[in-house]
Amino acid sequence: MNTQSTKTASTQASRPLRAMWLLNHSAARRFEVPMLKRMGIEEIFLPKTFPCEPSFRSASVEWDEDLNLSIPPDDLAVLNSIDWYSGGSREGWDLANRHFDMVFFIVHSPFLLHQIASHFQGVALWRAYGLQKEISYDFVLNLERDGRLRRGVNHLGARFYLAEAYAHIADDEPDYLKARRLYLPLGISTDTKPYRWTGELDRVLFVCPEIAINPYYRAIYRQFKRDFGDLPHVIGGAQPIKVNDSNVLGFVTAEEHARNMTQNRVMYYHSTEPNHIHYHPFEAIQAGMPLLYMAGGILDRMGGIDLPGRCRTVQEARKKLQRILAGDTRLIDSIRNSQPRLLEPMSVAACMPAWTDSFARLRSDMQTQRLERLARPSIRRQKRIAVCMPIAYQGGTLRGAQALAHALLSGSQQAGEPAEIVLLYPEDAEYRPVDWQKLPSEISRRSFSWHVLDSSEATRAMHYAGFTGWEPNAERFMVPDDGIQQLQDCDLWVFVSDRLSIPILPLRPQILVVYDYLQRYENVMPVGHDHAFLSAAFRAHRVLVTTRFTRQDALQYAGLRPHKVRKVPMLAPDLNQPDVTAEKGGYFVWPTNRAIHKNHSNAAEALRIYYGELEGEWDCLVTGQDKHQLLQSGLPHLQSLSDTFKVSKELRKRVHWKGYLDDRQYHQTLASANALWLPTRIDNGSFSVIEAGQLGVPSLCVDYPAMREINEQFHLDLTWMDGNDPRQMALQLKDMEHKAQSLSARLAATDCLAGQRVDDLASAYWQEVRECL
């Protein structure tokens, strides 16, 4: 028997039954929290934040229940600080598992249900207050085309309940939801002091929020104005944007709301929705205000099918409104005397039997599940994670993929959850044994090829894999074919890059590591060419970035939701090469390639000024791929580089084109340099400055956000230049001749990787990745 399961079960048995009620609806809370206590749940956690959105216009925060919670104050402080609507956090769910048996929730964000399914070990009750008649709960679960929400419900199994507020909510749902329905009827609290209607104002009160921003309510408003706009009326409801209609009240104080509920002659309720009802009709009935409502809505089920306030047609409603506005006391009295029947199904007495029966079932199910856990040994299978390079990267991205794999291996081991890490690369990549020499031996490698499926093939593959509700939303999909069931032996796929031109079939959860959105700043691809790359990020479960700068681009340019984008520390290479010599060679190193953002034109002009006007003392060694194409390329952005070299004999003499060097050759060359020179305009930062720092070589860089963040994390004391001003670049390079020695001494005296090595930062990576397992 698993020791942890035994300990958890013992703890649960010895403490009070506790629930998390992760909702903020004021009226529902006033009824449901007392009902939960009547069911024997004395300790209830309520969330302290809710989204600042118009749909939460009826929400509020309640702190009083905290006084009843017998959990450590520090734990409660963490729980109170979390935004549960967006999915919570791993720390929060760990605390929830420690202290709570059940969670009530609504699916404001699909990520919340995914998080509950992934991390919560207790009972999960989706509070179903009803949807518009065109929408089902099954539809909501299948909005995420990769099937993760439906998969989440399947994963929860017997711990999941569709806690319907009305007994018919799940009648038309598929069997998998019908089997999990639990009837917990919504009621109305009688604790608040009701308004006392007088009706001296001959006006119709109609409630319609969000007219200017919500198409659903805008259509309702326009229909009301067409049908009854000539009658005296006022329109209540929150209006985030002002409506050009003097009858629309917008925000009102509590006192003004009370006057509206007591002084207006009649309320008209438009809805014919069979599965959902607003709170304000019941508030009017409690106040004693006559309520006219349309037939076909949920009030018919609540005893209103033969009441005088019911209207079968707009014409009937109009006639009754006119009679009430004219002071027809006979009609008014008949409506007022009969309509309290609509409150009876929502009374505590009426709701109590259903709540009692449902909680008896709930307690029985929980006990059965607890006994099953105790009787069944818990065997934890080692997780296997694929770190995949979608194309044959070289240089920094290749090293980054290996560092990521290393971090996940180390992080999982540090957490006591050792995972198997597999590094995948395209089968046509020409890697050499030396390219893998720094990869930990515990990490296995596989080659793969991309296999493309049409939509029908993709559907069959997903159904065979168990995703029976999945439907394609693209014409083609691709899967990594590694010769082992399309990588399905791995629990999670982590792609090092978003360069995915076709959607990946979602056989497994996917994480993308996105280093930059260079196309936002440089003309590196045709307009619109990155649509597929941005779509890949939308489809991913999570996107990891290594700078605040890229995170902002992910939010603002890619349009990703904040909860999906996570910043992790930059992983720098640890040279660990004590045999590298450091005798200075009278030069500086400029690593570059053909990419447009490398700023070749300004760099060439800066070098011309440095040698021709400032009599620069150091030679320049240019390293990197494309040695023979930089001066001979026909690319427009390289033409000025070529032209500058053609007319400058000094440049041709002092600049030496070394081309590609393997790691050992490059580090030997760098160690003997006086400085590293990086005229690059913008990117996710260059780790070459970290390599230089480890070798005691100072760096002169263009000042842009990602480089600032590297300087901040690794304390490199970088020197800055303006990439748009060649003369200033040349002057800064000349100035480095005078201060390079002192900068080098400072770097040599410090360890820029102190606390920043892969093993030091591994836990941050593991925490992000394990949430998606």
Image (spheres, helix red, strand yellow):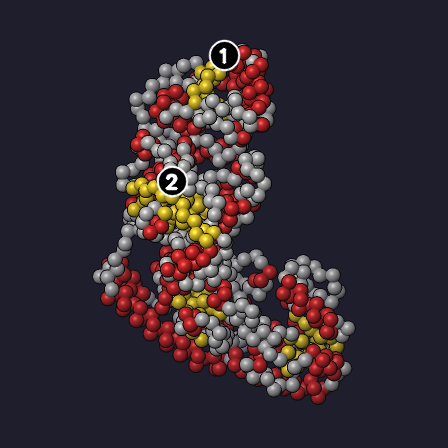
Packing grade of label 2 (10 A; few <14, some 14-19, many >=20) is many
- At x 43%, y 18%, the residue is 674
* Residue 612 visible from this viewpoint: yes
User: Dot 1 corresponds to which residue?
Assistant: 653
Give the x, y percent position of residue 457.
Answer: 42, 56
- At x 32%, y 47%, the residue is 483
Residue lying furthest left in this view?
A: 1
Q: Of 622 and 738, which appears nearest the observer?
A: 622
Assign the N terminus to one quadrant of the image: bottom left
Give the x, y percent position of residue 452.
Answer: 43, 49
- At x 63%, y 65%, the residue is 216
Residue type at the position of mark 1 = Lys
Closer to the N terminus: mark 1 or mark 2? 2
Residue type at the position of mark 2 = Pro
Residue 689 versus residue 130 in the image, above or below: above
User: Dot 2 corresponds to which residue?
Assistant: 426
Instruction: For mark 1, give the secondary structure.
Output: helix
Instruction: For mark 2, give the secondary structure.
Output: strand
Looking at the rendered structure, which numbered label has been put on residue 241?
none
Q: Comparing marks 1 and 2, which lies closer to the viewer? A: 2
Report the label total: 2
Give the x, y percent position of residue 676.
Answer: 45, 23
How far apart are the alpha carbons under marks 1 and 2? 41 Å
Residue 193: image quadrant is: bottom right
Residue 18 versus residue 400 in the image, above or below: below
Packing grade of label 1 (10 A; few <14, some 14-19, many >=20) is few
Give the x, y percent position of residue 758.
Answer: 35, 37
Residue 646 versus residue 211 in the image, above or below: above
